Amino acid sequence: MVSTKTLIAASLLGVFIATGCAVSNTYTEEELGLRKTDLYTEKTTVGDRTSYSKVAAGESKVIPRSFENAPPMISHDVEGMLPITKDANACTGCHLPEVAVAVKATPMPKSHFFDMRTQKMLTHMSEARYNCSACHAPQSANEPLVVNEFKPDYRKPNGAARSNLLDTLNEGVK
Ligand code: HEC
Ligand code: HEC
């Protein structure tokens, strides 16, 4: 028969193993945050410098879409093009479908010529799309603080390079 003493010793050992392992790692406060500096002051905290593409439109390499029908990132330099104002929108000067082919720019898709409120196609670009930079942004080349392991699945073979939101907008709804 197992003695009471042995039983107590065995269960105590179990408790040590269960609790001891969990508390072996400790972190300093500076290690806790993503920025690895003092958490109580901003004085020593300097953000990474942004580094946007300096490659001119027409010479840049487009960035693969993050997921199916994601708004594409702007791959080229936007120096002098932003902010977009009532009187000046350089983007449409190259991306409206009628000019895009000639300058080898990706033409704006069908969804940008559609009125989401009335659900009707328009004969001109929807005013709701005028401010391109509300949705399309240039990409800064910085090391991500946390590795993104998301892998997109595109249903069409060219899904990383072309969008078709208007064709799929109401999928599963009607
Ligand atoms: C001088 C013509 C020109 C102007 C102005 C211009 N673009 Fe472009 N854009 C291009 C070309 C050409 C490409 C294709 C990549 C390349 O050749 O650099 C492109 C690529 C893009 C892409 C990536 C498309 C894709 O298929 O991934 C986006 C988004 C974009 N431009 C948005 C804009 C926005 C927003 C503006 C205004 C701030 C703008 N562009 C101004 C010519 C232009
Ligand atoms: C309200 C957000 C929004 C605004 C504003 C907007 N876009 Fe887009 N754009 C998108 C989204 C989302 C997509 C991808 C899905 C789709 O619509 O097909 C897209 C796709 C595109 C594409 C890729 C087309 C293709 O066939 O792959 C181009 C080029 C583009 N937009 C240019 C522009 C330009 C130029 C402007 C300004 C005149 C603009 N967009 C304004 C959200 C926006």
Image: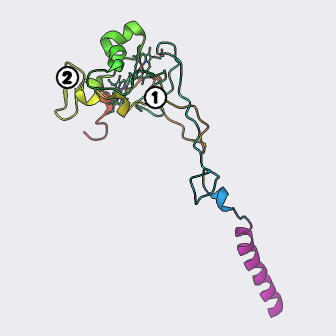
Q: Residues within 10 Å of mark 1 (few under 14, many from 20)?
A: some
Tell me: is circle 1 under 8 Å from ligand 1: yes
Please name the residue shown 54% across and 37% down the image: 151
User: Is 101 on the left or on the right of 36, as rendered?
Assistant: left
Q: What quarter of the picture does the C terminus occupy?
A: top left
Q: Mark 1 points at which residue?
A: 73
Q: Residue furthest top?
A: 102
Q: Which residue lies furthest to the left in this view?
A: 118
Query: Which of these two is toward me, 39 or 107?
Result: 39
Please name the residue shown 60% across and 49% down the image: 45
Task: Point out the quarter of the image occupied by ligand 2.
Answer: top left
Q: Quadrant of residue 85?
A: top left
Q: Where is residue 84 in the image (x, y as percent from the top left)?
A: 33, 26
Q: Main secondary structure of the magenta part?
A: helix
Q: How crowded is mark 2: few (under 14 residues within 10 Å), some or many (20 or more)?
A: few
Look at the image and give the residue range highlighted in magenta. Answer: 1-24
The amino acid sitting under disc 2 is Leu
Q: Which numbered circle lies on residue 8?
A: none
Q: Residue furthest bottom?
A: 4
Please name the residue shown 71% across and 74% down the image: 19
User: Where 165 falls versus 11 (above or below)?
Assistant: above
- Helix, strand or loop at disc 1? loop
User: Where 42 falls versus 142 (above or below)?
Assistant: below
Label 2 to label 1, Cα distance in Å?
25 Å
Query: Which of these two is toward me, 113 or 47?
Result: 47
The amino acid sitting under disc 1 is Met
User: Is 144 on the left or on the right of 114, as rendered?
Assistant: right
Q: Which numbered circle lies on residue 122?
A: 2
Q: Where is residue 154 in the image (x, y as percent from the top left)?
A: 47, 31
Query: Which of these two is toward me, 133 or 71?
Result: 133
| Disc on the earlier residue, 2 or 1 | 1
Tell me: is circle 2 under 8 Å from ligand 2: no
